[in-house]
Amino acid sequence: MKRILSLILTFVLLLSFTACSGNFAQVDLKEPIALADDGIVKRDVFEKIKNENAIATFTGESGEMEYEWTIFGSDLKDTKDVNLSITLEKTEKGIKIKFSETEDFGFPALLSVHLNEKWKVDSATAYDGKDTVYSVSITGSKTSILNISVNKIVTECEILPDNEIQTENTPSTESSSNDNKQDNSETNKTDDYLSGVKDSDDRIYSDGQNKGKDKYETDPVPEGKPLPVEPEDQEVDKKKTYTCTFSIECSTILNNLKDLDPDKRELVPSNGVILAPTKVTFYEGESVFDVLQRVCKEKGIHMESSWTPIYNSAYIEGIHNLYEFDCGELSGWMYRVNGWYPNYGCSRYQLVDGEKVEFRYTCDLGKDVGCEWMAGS
Amino acid sequence: MSKRPMNPKTKKKLFIGIGAGVLLLLLILALLFMNFDKIIGGTPTLTIETPQKISKSETEEFSLDVTISSFGDAIYPAASMSISFDSSRLEFIGVEEGNVFIRNDEGDVPQKLPNWSCNPEQSNKSGKINIMYLDTTGGKNAFSKELLAEDDNVVLRLKFRLRGSVRSGDICGLIFDDAVFAASDETQSLAMTTDTLKVRDGKIVIGE
């Protein structure tokens, strides 16, 4: 009897100990797991994540900030005990992270740092002294969340906004430019005009070497600006979508109302804005003209164009029923992309992600809208 | 009247028995404590389920589940949620039905799926998805806890497609800005702002 009672007692003691220690394989991977005070996550927990091919979340706090690790079971191979605890500290320009773990985890992990305020920064990078250690994406509209893919562990790093550090830390592109020049050698053979370098967006940029006009009467494209493409050669891939910002305005007319055709006066918006900057979606391979056509159709804005074979491009005659020469003999529509007025037609400008396109009405051959080359010519 | 002294053997057995009983009680309490939230239901939580990594070359549409852990005792004739996302990397296609039913008090069948409203075009411009359900029958087509399953209650599914601008290693957060399940009696509504509804954001991680 005594022996039976001692056995029961031992069993109960063992169960109590296991249950209270929290390692009773009770970890519910569907729920976020709060990190223990020491931050250590045991190997068997990682084994469970791996075996279940689960996506586990571990949460912790540092000062007023919270952080969260996301670990994909598919990324785990060899597992071990890992300390996921970190210390977060606000600095003058960014956020400093100190890792408690000193060795690499052995798997990539996703760290999300929840700031309790909005950080008005588009993108940021984590630096370990001088070197870039992680790129950081920022999400959240009310408060910001910094997402970092942690592949290697450093003692500490500082997350700084990209616009603060670009001047000092912009990586050299010399070697890649040379490689790209070689890649484009075949292109150069087919058309000397297309002398340029290919950027990461696959668009070819001018290297500024050409002096003459191309077969469509286009003057040399300034160095660093995209070279024109021929609309008939472009293939639109509707499976790949991107966004750009589009706007249409005619505010210059407001300063030249005396020259405006009186019949058109009521067409001019009081602030000159026909389409305020609007984010629009486009497909890979589309030109500025393709997108202008679609935007105008969708927004119910009148637009008339004509094909000009000599320039191999559409010519924009009128938008919103405001035509060329409606406001003087030097008036008409021009387009600007990322602050530059391309010296070729909008059918030949192939868009890439994130560009800012503006259609602007000029009353003085571009001078009044900041197009120097047009004004000079 | 004098008490007869207890036999020492019986006394020992009694102590061991009491000790075992106390430990057993402690064990039960510990287990109950660990599963407390599950047992009493806890605060309802709305979660955007993070999917497995998505290849940067994925061209097909994919869906993310938005799940709810539980409801309160009220009926909820209206629901809305506002989720911000990176529209330069993701294209929001629309909302698909989940598996959480609403009551169908006047219909042939006792339950049906809700019709969620949203405007993908506007969402892709603003980077914010506003989704809404409104029962215009005054509660006959409302959400209620009787219609929830034990787990995996998918309220709706968010359908996306990757844009060509995504790169391997990108992380696209899907952040709840607001979420409400409104009850007829406002004090029983579940709302993120009053902490009566917890939310858990999701993220899409882009792989090779």
Image (cartoon, coloured by chain):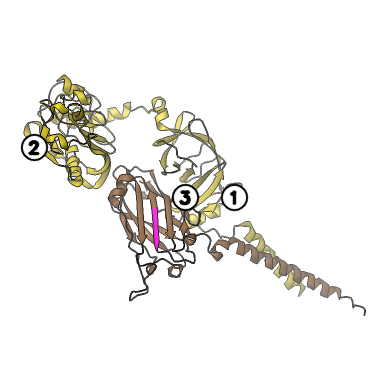
Q: Label 3, on which residue?
A: A71
* Chain the render paints brown: B
* Chain the render paints yellow: A
Report helix, strand or loop for mark 3.
Answer: strand
Q: Label 2, on which residue?
A: A306
Viewer-closest of A79 and B144 = B144
Marks 2/3 in contact by CB < 8 Å: the verdict is no
Say which of marks 2 and 1 sits in front. Answer: 2
Q: Quadrant of residue A217?
A: top left
Report helix, strand or loop for mark 2.
Answer: strand
Give the x, y percent position of residue B135.
Answer: 36, 64
Q: Is residue B80 magenta?
A: yes
Seen at 40% across and 59% down, the residue is B79
Q: Is residue A53 visible?
A: no
Q: Is residue A145 magenta?
A: no
- Give the Cα separation between the discs numbered 2 and 1: 69 Å
Q: Which residues are magenta?
A: B76-81
Q: Main secondary structure of the magenta part?
A: strand
